[in-house]
Image (cartoon, helix red, strand yellow):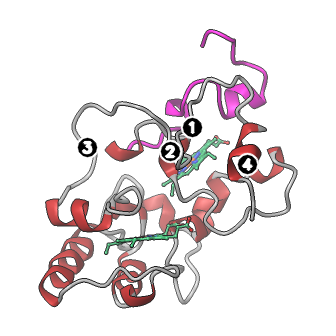
């Protein structure tokens, strides 16, 4: 079993982060979300983890996620037909699709066939985070290591992932020696 907290500690150099029991960060989130929200989705798909914004995965990947809920990364996330249809319609309408303008359309780059069902396995996602395995001195990260986006992106629940809006004391500013203790 990989000690994710200890590994992460190696990149949280300034130690300003407070990890709770589940490895989640205690952090208030304010302001309107930057993506179309759906109450049913937030409730059902936010029960075990962050309700991932629909524009973080291609529609084709969401369809694969939604058709395999009985074995969802080792968990059973099955829904009744009506709820599943509702959520599938929401993800079809708001997921990434070539030709549909979206803030996160970069994530469609280099999409393999079949498309991954993890955001964290999209080639563009891996590129965006290429420095993390380097900083951790690992060839690759354990599966799902970056799945809890909010550990690092303080406004993940709002769908905001700018590299400048990570938790303080973390990321490129620290790696490049530009962060200060009172940042
Ligand atoms: C019963 C708990 C549970 C529910 C409910 C649940 N999930 Fe998950 N989900 C998981 C687990 C466990 C993982 C794997 C997490 C990991 O690897 O750290 C996961 C991972 C994911 C990932 C991949 C994250 C990555 O690595 O990029 C996506 C996408 C996802 N879930 C979507 C959904 C959607 C959509 C729903 C609602 C239909 C949903 N989940 C409901 C437990 C759940
Ligand atoms: C361990 C910390 C960590 C986790 C977990 C993490 N990220 Fe990141 N993310 C970063 C860092 C650090 C950067 C900036 C990398 C750089 O600029 O070299 C980044 C960059 C990004 C960017 C590009 C931002 C920009 O300004 O170009 C996106 C989009 C993003 N992350 C989305 C996500 C999503 C979605 C998740 C969860 C599925 C996630 N990240 C999980 C640390 C993390």
Give the mark nearest the N terminus, 3 or 1: 1
Q: In the image, residue 146 lies at what x, y percent?
A: 60, 56
Q: Secondary structure at mark 2?
A: loop
Q: Distance between the Cα atoms at labels 3 and 4?
A: 26 Å
Give residue 40's quadrant in the image.
bottom left
Q: Which residue is mark 4?
A: 132
Q: Which residue is mark 2?
A: 24
Q: Are marks 3 and 1 in contact (CB under 8 Å)?
A: no
Q: Distance between the Cα atoms at labels 2 and 4?
A: 18 Å
Q: Distance between the Cα atoms at labels 3 and 2?
A: 20 Å
Q: Are marks 2 and 1 in contact (CB under 8 Å)?
A: yes
Q: Secondary structure at mark 3?
A: loop
Q: Are marks 2 and 4 in contact (CB under 8 Å)?
A: no
Give the mark nearest the N terminus, 3 or 4: 3
Q: Distance between the Cα atoms at labels 4 and 1?
A: 18 Å
Q: Residue furthest top?
A: 182
Q: Secondary structure at mark 4?
A: helix
Q: Residues within 10 Å of mark 2 (few under 14, many from 20)?
A: some
- Of badges 3 and 1, the one in the foreground is 1
Q: Which residue is mark 3?
A: 33
Give the mark nearest the N terminus, 2 or 1: 1
Position of residue 7 relative to residue 140, above or below, is: above
Judge whether residue 181 is colored magenta. yes
Q: Which residues are magenta?
A: 160-183
Q: Which residue is mark 1?
A: 19
User: What secondary structure is the magenta-colored segment mainly?
Assistant: loop
Q: Are marks 3 and 2 in contact (CB under 8 Å)?
A: no
- Of badges 4 and 1, the one in the foreground is 1
Label 4 within 8 A of ligand 2 by Cβ: yes
């Amino acid at each position: 079993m990989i000690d994710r907290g200890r590994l992460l500690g190696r990149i949280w150099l300034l130690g300003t982060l407070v990890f709770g029991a589940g490895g989640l960060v205690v952090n208030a989130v304010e302001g309107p979300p930057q993506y179309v929200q759906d109450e049913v989705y937030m409730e059902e798909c936010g029960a075990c983890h962050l309700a991932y914004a629909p524009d973080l995965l291609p529609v084709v990947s969401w369809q694969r996620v939604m058709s395999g809920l009985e074995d969802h990364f080792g968990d059973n996330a099955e829904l009744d037909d009506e709820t599943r249809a509702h959520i599938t319609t929401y993800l079809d309408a708001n997921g990434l699709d070539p030709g549909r303008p979206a803030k996160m359309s970069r994530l469609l780059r280099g999409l393999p066939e079949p498309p991954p069902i993890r955001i964290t396995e999209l080639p563009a996602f891996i590129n965006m985070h290429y420095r993390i395995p380097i900083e951790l001195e690992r060839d690759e990260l354990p599966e799902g290591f970056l799945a809890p986006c909010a550990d690092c992106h303080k406004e993940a629940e709002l769908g905001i992932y700018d590299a400048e809006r990570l938790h303080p004391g973390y990321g490129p500013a620290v790696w490049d020696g530009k962060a200060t203790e009172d940042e």
